[in-house]
Image (cartoon, rainbow, N blue to C red):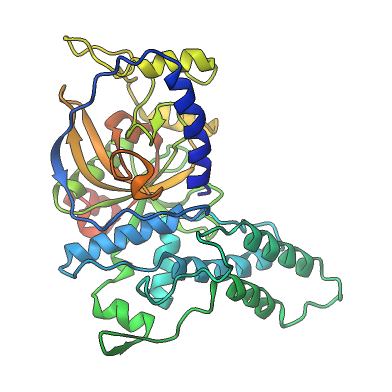
Amino acid sequence: MKKTFLTIIILAFFSVNLTMAQETTKEEKVYSTVVDIPTTSVKNQQSTGTCWCFAGISYIETELLRMGAPEIDLSEMYIVRLAYSQKAKRYFRYHGKGNYSEGGQAHDVLNVVKENGFVPESVYSGNRYGSGFHIHKEMVQSTKAMLDEVIKNPNRKITPVWEESVNAVLDTYMGKVPSNFELDGVEYTPVSYAEKLGFNADDYIELTSYSHHPFYQKINLEIPDNWSDDLYYNVPMDDMMEVINYALNNGFSVCWDGDVSEKGFSHRNGYAVLPSEKTVDMTDSEIAKWEKDLAKDEKGNSKKDIEPEVSQELRQATFDDFETTDDHLMHLTGIVKDQYGKVYYKTKNSWAENSNQFGGYLNMSEAYVKLKTVAVMVHKDAIPKELKKKLGL
């Protein structure tokens, strides 16, 4: 995932100016809460492509709350720093044919936690490069250039210090990760801290839903940021939606991976819906007119709110032609309904609390989630009993 807050600010600037040029007759949405999972504060990934970690850490913090722990602010950059080392090693092993970038998946967080635990934000900030905000472009491009030169093997024999050299650069930018730390007078290692809080990374699984693989089996999902070739349980769309609803209705939040490139996705306005019209080829003025159609009449009709039916076939088609790509990870923390009874999923983003008037949250429609979900991560206990049997859990 490489969607950054800096990018969204630029897009929002043009969208604001375009919208201000139009007559505004929008009716405000009124949402009523159906489910609201207690969670931690909204964070800001800033100018990094590390949404996968911000969503994953938000999910873990929320799981800790569910399990009775106090609210804790965990360090995202501790996970990111260790993941970069893992990516570098894999990129080298694949002779530069793999993915070495800022992006990742929810399981990357779990994979780091399994071996290395986690630490509070106060213990590791991950920023030693003199910037007031996180930005990783220079660091990633520099270390990738190093790796590419090592892979070329100019000495005709790979030196045993290449990995140490790459990690030294990462440490220069982000700082060495702590092997131990003190908190409230108690000495911990990152692993013992995770164990003390009762978090078990093996309790979580990822699910996806694409018909080019058999259902009810583990599959290697072919998306660029699955650089570690982790496996997902592949289930039909209806089962995937049942898991999301079952989880939220039973006190479990959901880590969400999906596509936010649709014209109907507007973090600034706090919603994501599927357009009833094809917006790919629309002009700016046509898109502005479509934006203005958010309001419903007294019968509850609105061009914008009449979303297309989503099927398994449509999911597959949009995945196959790259209309649906794994752009971004966020965190589903609730269910709401608008004044017309339409269902939305309350979604915690990582573009800062002040990034919109909704405190950094948005509501994604049920149809949007059906079509644009690439994968979800949930606790095993958030899987309905019958589906658990089918998956062998």
Depth check, front residue: 377 or 222: 377
Number of numbered discs present? 0
- Residue 391 in sight: yes
Image vertical order of residue 14 relative to residue 63, above or below? above
Say which residue appears at 81% left-offset and 66% top-offset.
152
- Residue 277 in sight: no
Say which residue appears at 68% left-offset and 59% top-offset.
141
Left or right of residue 365, residue 283 in this image: right
Depth check, front residue: 301 or 139: 139
Left or right of residue 385, residue 222 in this image: right
Say which residue appears at 79% left-offset and 66% top-offset.
149
Depth check, front residue: 386 or 295: 295
Q: Residue 61: give x, y in percent of width and height.
A: 28, 63
Q: Residue 11: give x, y in percent of width and height.
A: 51, 34
Say which residue appears at 42% left-offset and 13% top-offset.
289
Left or right of residue 299, residue 328 in this image: right
